[in-house]
Amino acid sequence: MKKIITTVIFAAGFSMAAMSCAKEYNCVCSNYSEIVEANSETEAENTCDAKGPNCDIQ
């Protein structure tokens, strides 16, 4: 039972650490802006580009 609890706590801690690696980027489009969460600037640019042709990371 103790090993199960330790494993669950470790998994929860690992998940929180993995999620905290994501950064927020400002995706600015022609008439609105939106915050995009991504693990890298390249990922943020790809996500922002998918929102429209006039969208860019600022």
Image: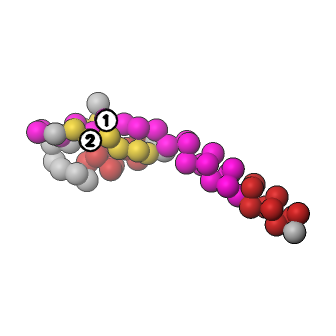
Left or right? Give the position of 56 relative to 14: left
Q: Which amino acid does label 2 sit on?
A: Glu
Q: Which residue is drawn at 16% across and 39% down?
A: 32
Q: In terms of sequence position, does the residue under pointer 1 or pointer 2 come before the other?
A: 1
Look at the image and give the residue range highlighted in magenta.
11-31
Provide the secondary structure element on which disc 2 rests: strand
Residue 52 sits above or below residue 29 on the image: below
Q: Which residue is drawn at 62% across and 53% down?
A: 15
Residue 51 sits above or below residue 54 on the image: below
Residue 21: % across, % down: 55, 42
Foreground residue, 47 or 34? Answer: 34
- Residue at the far left: name it: 31
Q: Which mark is residue 26?
A: 1
Q: Which residue is drawn at 75% across and 55% down?
A: 10
Residue 37 sits above or below residue 26 on the image: below
Residue 18: % across, % down: 60, 48
Left or right? Give the position of 30 relative to 34: left
Query: In the rendered image, which quarter contains the C terminus?
Result: top left
Q: What residue type is labelled 1?
A: Asn
Q: Residues within 10 Å of mark 2 (few under 14, many from 20)?
A: some
Taking the magenta stretch, the answer to whether it contains residue 21 is yes
Query: In the rendered image, which quarter contains the N terminus?
Result: bottom right
> Mark 1 to mark 2: distance in Å?
6 Å
Residue 27: % across, % down: 27, 39
Residue at label 2?
Answer: 34
Q: Are marks 1 and 2 in contact (CB under 8 Å)?
A: yes
Foreground residue, 11 or 52? Answer: 11
